[in-house]
Image (tube, rainbow, N blue to C red):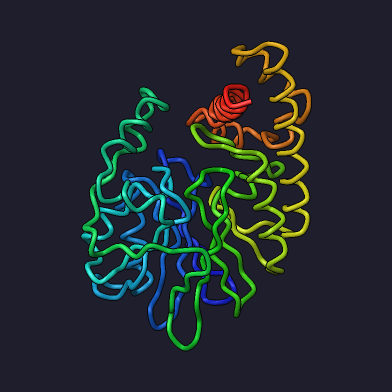
Amino acid sequence: MDVHPGDITQIDTLLGGIPGMTCVQVVQGESPALIDCGAQTSAVTVRDALHAMGIGADDLAWVVLTHVHLDHCGAVGDLAQAFPNATVVVHPRGARHLVEPNRLVQGTAALFGNLAPVMGGLLAVPEGRIVIAEDGHEVALGGGRVLRAVHAPGHARHHMALLDEGEGVLFSGDAIGVQMGGGDLYPSLPPPEYDVDAALETLDALEALGATRAYVSHAGPTADPGEAFDQGRRAQSAMGQAARESWRTAPGDVEALWQAVEQAWPSDGAIATPEARIRWTAFNWLDNNALGLAGMAEREARTA
């Protein structure tokens, strides 16, 4: 655990037993909130870390999900059982997947193949424990402190960020990008819903919030929010344009698309150390980027 200014504690979920891959944050207050919760296989790690902070079974008030990809939400059912007073806050498009998770779990298994068991599944959350966060919804932490939900599509349609206005802190999920140590921030563009136009609009909207600190889920605070937004914008613009142009030239050729994307915005800057390479390759994140961009290009070609 790492303690940060503003009563924020970061927990490394140790996804796949690998440190520095995925983190969640705890925002303290009279009603403490957990921002994301990690994969199901990380549930015990997160639970024990919360207990070590002094947050007992009856103390956690909120589990707020940026989106319902299993590396962010898979532990939510287990933690709902471990913390029976916690209310789960989620984007309107994500709520149904928490109540009936089979489709989400099956889709994730199809994407990750033999790596899926390392991620785990998702225990269903009772519908009465879920609050749907429309854009602008506020999660009250007590003492006047709130987290404001900001819908942030692009990475997924059901993605949102959380703004702690009093502290000037933005919890951006995967909207800005990924920084897993030893290299540059780099986009996360997974199937099946990645949309570069929505992503760029989201980056503009999030930057306009004026946060002085920004956390990315993989994995932690950025060094400079302004620089992070700028790099995320330039990277996604270049990668999206390259993917579209490649698909027009060679429709259906994912390998050619990825070669074009790598030429437009090389991943070497993000994978600059052996530790970063381990984290980037453990769950085939780059392959998922290729599939996400190909899926976007194929949708656009189909509806043109």
Does 223 sit left or right of 137 as displayed? right
Pick the residue in front: 226 or 252.
Answer: 252
Residue at 43%, 84% in the rendered image: 142
Q: Quadrant of residue 209?
A: bottom right
Q: Quadrant of residue 29?
A: bottom left
- Where residue 21 sits: x, y (%)? 51, 44
- Where residue 254 sits: x, y (%)? 60, 16
Q: Quadrant of residue 273?
A: top right
Relative to residue 279, is residue 93 depicted above or below? below
Quarter in which the C terminus is drawn = top right
Residue at 51%, 65% in the rendered image: 149
Residue at 31%, 52% in the rendered image: 43
- Where residue 156 sits: x, y (%)? 52, 43
- Where residue 47 sits: x, y (%)? 31, 60
Residue at 59%, 59% in the rendered image: 215
Does 8 sit left or right of 88 as displayed? right
Count of labels in the image: 0
Pick the residue in front: 242 or 34.
Answer: 242
Does 262 sit left or right of 11 as displayed? right
Relative to residue 181, is residue 34 depicted above or below? below
Relative to residue 162, is residue 59 depicted above or below? below
Q: Which residue is the extreme one toward the bottom?
A: 143
Pick the residue in front: 66 or 83.
Answer: 66
